[in-house]
Image: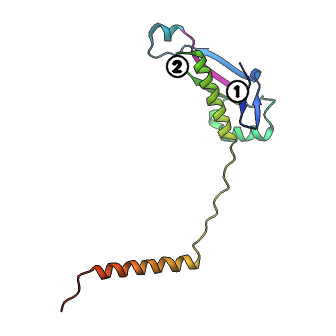
Amino acid sequence: MDDLPIGDRFVIPANELIERFETSGGPGGQHANRSATRVVLSFDVAASETVDPDAKRRIVEKLGPRLRDGVVTVDAGESRSQWRNRQAARRRLRELLEEALRPEPPPRRPTRPGAAARRRRLEEKRARGEVKRLRRRPDIE
């Protein structure tokens, strides 16, 4: 198993990843029941030596309910190929960690429209009302 790069931030060494193979179950008959093609990939965030403390904190905050004892786990079993499932599990773990490490945009500060914007809005409303008034049938007395 190879190291897993997480964006530009760091690389998880292969010895920190735990890979398990299981039978995928579901339809497929004897192949699905006998072949261990489903991949379960785990990464112990809490015990990792390559992830800096700030990144660990952000991962734990974002993935809180998904972590079990500081370990994040993904699985892949869609393909009949163990190799494809390994690639899919690695991709999912990488995307999950990159998403957790992505900085949040700053909170929006509520603003009010300026005086000129309010004035333009009212002028547009008046002009629109005038157009609608001119479309009416004239009053005949």
Q: Is residue 128 above or below residue 14?
A: below
Question: Residue 103 bears which disc, if any?
Answer: none
* Residue beneath disc 2: 79
Q: Amino acid at mark 1?
A: Phe
As for residue 38 lying within the magenta part, the answer is yes
Identify the main secondary structure in magenta: strand
**Callout 1 environment at 10 Å: few (<14), some (14 to 19), or many (20+)?**
many
**Image point (57%, 79%), residue name:** 116
Horizontally, is 96 left or right of 13 in the view?
Answer: left
| Quadrant of the rendered image containing residue 87 | top right
Q: Is residue 82 above or below residue 73?
A: above
> Residue 6 location, x and y as percent?
71, 34
Q: Is residue 134 above or below residue 64?
A: below
Point out the image quarter for the C terminus: bottom left
Q: How is the image coloured?
A: rainbow
Q: Amino acid at mark 2?
A: Ser
Horizontally, is 112 left or right of 134 in the view?
Answer: right
| Quadrant of the rendered image containing residue 39 | top right
* Residue beneath disc 1: 43
**Image point (52%, 19%), residue name:** 79
Q: Nearer the viewer, mark 1 or mark 2?
A: 2
Pick whichever, 56 or 98, lies toward us: 98
**Callout 2 environment at 10 Å: few (<14), some (14 to 19), or many (20+)?**
some
Residue at the far bottom in the pictured view: 141
**Image point (70%, 41%), residue name:** 101
Point out the image quarter for the N terminus: top right
Q: Label 1 vs label 2: CA separation?
A: 22 Å
Instruction: Magenta stretch: give its range.
Output: 35-43
